Image (cartoon, rainbow, N blue to C red):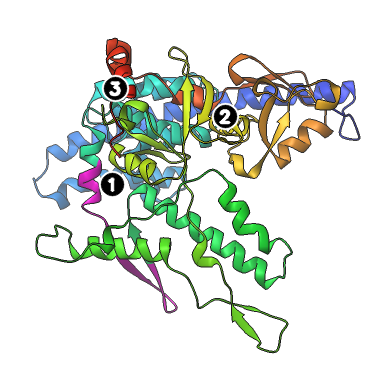
C-alpha cells in the first residue's frame, strides 16, 4: 500500500524539485561531454609526445622524457600532480583508441563518467577492435539505463562471451598461475593475498563472513545465534571446496609450490573449523569453544547454460554478482550439489519464464531470486538475500501472490515505496516502472533479461539435436 505522510511535497515544492532535477541531469550531460572532450585532448597530447619520443634515442629512459615533460607542463597549468596527468594520458589513450563507441556515448550524454571505468576495464583484455565493437554494442544500451554498479558485472560477462579465445582455455592458463603471497606493511603488519579461481575466492569470502557473523552474535549474546546457521543454509546455495589440496603430492603432480599453497589455503578456509574462537558461557566452566562454525558451508549461486551442463559446449557459466566461470567447474559444482534450479528462459527475449527443481521446494521464491538478483529499485545492487519480497499491488488491496506482482526490494527502498509518494507498477517480463514524487518515470529491467541470451549454437538448429540428448544421454557429472 502506498501511503502519504510528512514526506509528501506541496505542488510548489514538487515543481521546484522537478526543475532542480532537470538541471542536475543537464549538468551531468554537460560533464559527460566535457570529459569526452578532455579524453580526446589528452589522447592528442599523448600522440604528439609519442612522435617527439620517436625522434630521440631508442633507450626507454630517453623515450619517456617527452611524456614526462608534457605531463609536468599540463600538471602545472591544471594545479594537479604530474603523475595524475600521466595516468590520465594512459586512460585517455585506452578510451579514445580502443573504445570509440563508449567515447561517443559519453560525449552524447547517454552514459556518464561513472560508467567508463567499468566498461573499459571489462573490455580491456579483448584482443581486437572487432571484439571490442561487439562488446560495446551489447553493453552500451544497458549502461544507458542502469547505474555503473549494475553495469560492471554485466560488462564482464559480455566481455568473456565475445572473446575470440575460448573461456575454458584462458581459465586453465590463468588457474595455473594461482598462488599465495605476503606484502609486508608498516607497524608489523602484512597483507596475505591469494590468487584463486573466482568460485573458490568468493566461497572463502562468503564462509568467513558467515563465521564472523556467528562469532559476533555469540559475543553479544544475540538471541538469533541458534538459528543463524540454519537460516544461512536455508538460502539457495552450493557448498564449495577445491579438493585439490587433498591430492597426494606424488610424482607427476603438475602443480607448482605456489599452486599447492593456494589450494591448501582454500581448503583450510572452506572446510576447517576455527576452534580457537571461544564464546563466554554462564556456567562454571568459563569460556567454551563456539561450536558449529565448522558446519557452516560457503554458498555461491551459479547459472549454467543447459548446453554446457550436458557437456555439449564449454560456454562459461555465471557466478552471481561476479561474472563468468569455466564450464568444467560449473559442471562439477552441479554434480556435487544436493539440489539445483532449472531455469526456462524465452528463446527470443531471454526473460525468465519459470524455475523448477527436481525436488519440491518454494518455486515462486526461486523464480524471483533468479529473475531479480538484487533490489529492483533503479540503480540498487543490494542482493536478494538482503531484500524483501514485496507485493507490487498490496495484498490487502487485491494484489495477487504471483510472479507478475512480486519483486525484491531492499529494506530502504521497501520503506520508500510504502511511506513516500513514490509509485511503482509491474509490466510484462518483470519490468518495474517507478514514478517519482515529481512525476518522472524510471524503468528497471531485470538483469536476467539481458544476461540470459540464447546461444548461437542453439539458434542454428542445434536445439533439435540436443533435445534428444537431454532425454537419452546422462549428464557428464
Residue 232 position within the rendered picture, expressed as x and y whole percent measured from the top left: 59, 52
Label 2, residues with CA under 10 Å away: few <14, some 14-19, many ≥20: many
Looking at the image, which is closer to me, 31 or 415? Answer: 415
Quadrant containing the C terminus is top left
Query: On the picture, is 161 further left or further right than 439?
Result: left
Q: Residue tagged by mark 3? A: 469
Whether residue 329 is visible: yes
Query: In the image, which residues are magenta?
Result: 171-191
Residue 113 position within the rendered picture, expressed as x and y whole percent measured from the top left: 49, 32
Residue 431 position within the rendered picture, expressed as x and y whole percent measured from the top left: 61, 19
Residue at the image point whose x is 57% and y is 29% from the top? 367
Residue 403 position within the rendered picture, expressed as x and y whole percent measured from the top left: 65, 23
Which secondary structure lies at badge 3? helix
Spatial distance from mark 1 to mark 2, Cα to Cα? 58 Å
Residue at the image point whose x is 29% and y is 23% from the top? 472
Label 1, residues with CA under 10 Å away: few <14, some 14-19, many ≥20: few
Query: On the picture, is 99 further left or further right than 362?
Result: left
Q: Residue tagged by mark 2? A: 367
Depth check, mark 2 against mark 3: the one in front is 3
Label 3, residues with CA under 10 Å away: few <14, some 14-19, many ≥20: some
Q: Residue tagged by mark 1? A: 69
Indicate which disc, 2 or 3, sits on the residue closer to the N terminus.
2
* Figure quadrant of residue 122: top left
Q: Measured along the vertical axis of the image, is residue 217 above or below residue 55?
A: below
Spatial distance from mark 2 to mark 3, Cα to Cα? 26 Å
Is the residue under label 3 in contact with that under label 2 (CB below 8 Å)?
Answer: no
Residue at the image point whose x is 12% and y is 38% from the top? 55
Query: On the picture, is 415 further left or further right than 9?
Result: left
Whether residue 382 is visible: no
Q: Measured along the vertical axis of the image, is residue 417 above or below residue 321?
A: above
Indicate which disc, 3 or 1, sits on the residue closer to the N terminus.
1
Amino acid at each position: 500500500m502506498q501511503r502519504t505522510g510528512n514526506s509528501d511535497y506541496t505542488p510548489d515544492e514538487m515543481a521546484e524539485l522537478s526543475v532542480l532535477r532537470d538541471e542536475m541531469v543537464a549538468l551531468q550531460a554537460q560533464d559527460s561531454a566535457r570529459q569526452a572532450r578532455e579524453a580526446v585532448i589528452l589522447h592528442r597530447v599523448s600522440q604528439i609526445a609519442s612522435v617527439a619520443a620517436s625522434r630521440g634515442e631508442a633507450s626507454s629512459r630517453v623515450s619517456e622524457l617527452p611524456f614526462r615533460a608534457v605531463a609536468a607542463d599540463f600538471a602545472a597549468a591544471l594545479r594537479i600532480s604530474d603523475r595524475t596527468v600521466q595516468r590520465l594520458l594512459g586512460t585517455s589513450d585506452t578510451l579514445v583508441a580502443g573504445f570509440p563507441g563508449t567515447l561517443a556515448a559519453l560525449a552524447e550524454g547517454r552514459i556518464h563518467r561513472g560508467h567508463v571505468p567499468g566498461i573499459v576495464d571489462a573490455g580491456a583484455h579483448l584482443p581486437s577492435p572487432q571484439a571490442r565493437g561487439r562488446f560495446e554494442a551489447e553493453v552500451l544500451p544497458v549502461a544507458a539505463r542502469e547505474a555503473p554498479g549494475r553495469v560492471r558485472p554485466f560488462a564482464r560477462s559480455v566481455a568473456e562471451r565475445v572473446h575470440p579465445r575460448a573461456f575454458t582455455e584462458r581459465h586453465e592458463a590463468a588457474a595455473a598461475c594461482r598462488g599465495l603471497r605476503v606484502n609486508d606493511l608498516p607497524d608489523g603488519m602484512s597483507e596475505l593475498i591469494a590468487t584463486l579461481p573466482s568460485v573458490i575466492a568468493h566461497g572463502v569470502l562468503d564462509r568467513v563472513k558467515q563465521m564472523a557473523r556467528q562469532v559476533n552474535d555469540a559475543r553479544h549474546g544475540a538471541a538469533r545465534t541458534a538459528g543463524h546457521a540454519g537460516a544461512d543454509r536455508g538460502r539457495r546455495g552450493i557448498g564449495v571446496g577445491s579438493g585439490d589440496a587433498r591430492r597426494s603430492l606424488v610424482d607427476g603432480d603438475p602443480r607448482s609450490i605456489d599452486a599447492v599453497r593456494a589450494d591448501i589455503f582454500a581448503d583450510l578456509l572452506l572446510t576447517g573449523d576455527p576452534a580457537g574462537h571461544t564464546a563466554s558461557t554462564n556456567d562454571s566452566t568459563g569460556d567454551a569453544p563456539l561450536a558449529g562454525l565448522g558446519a557452516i558451508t560457503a554458498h555461491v549461486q551459479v547459472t549454467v547454460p543447459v548446453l554446457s551442463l550436458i557437456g555439449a559446449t564449454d560456454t562459461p557459466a555465471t557466478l552471481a554478482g561476479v561474472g563468468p566461470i569455466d564450464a568444467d567447474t560449473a559442471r562439477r559444482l552441479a554434480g556435487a550439489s544436493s539440489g539445483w534450479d532449472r531455469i526456462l528462459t524465452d528463446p527470443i527475449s531471454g526473460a525468465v519464464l519459470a524455475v523448477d527443481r527436481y525436488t519440491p521446494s518454494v518455486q515462486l521464491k526461486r523464480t524471483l531470486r533468479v529473475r531479480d538478483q538484487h533490489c529492483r529499485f533503479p540503480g540498487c545492487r543490494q542482493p536478494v538475500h538482503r531484500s524483501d519480497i514485496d507485493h507490487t499491488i498490496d495484498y490487502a488491496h487485491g494484489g495477487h501472490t504471483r510472479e507478475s506482482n512480486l519483486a525484491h526490494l531492499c529494506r530502504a527502498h521497501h520503506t520508500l515505496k510504502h511511506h513516500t509518494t513514490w509509485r511503482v507498477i509491474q509490466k510484462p517480463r518483470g519490468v518495474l516502472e517507478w514514478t517519482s514524487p515529481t512525476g518522472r518515470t524510471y524503468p528497471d529491467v531485470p538483469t536476467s533479461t539481458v544476461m540470459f541470451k540464447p546461444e548461437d549454437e542453439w539458434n542454428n538448429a542445434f536445439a533439435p539435436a540436443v533435445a534428444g540428448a537431454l532425454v537419452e544421454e546422462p549428464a557428464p557429472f
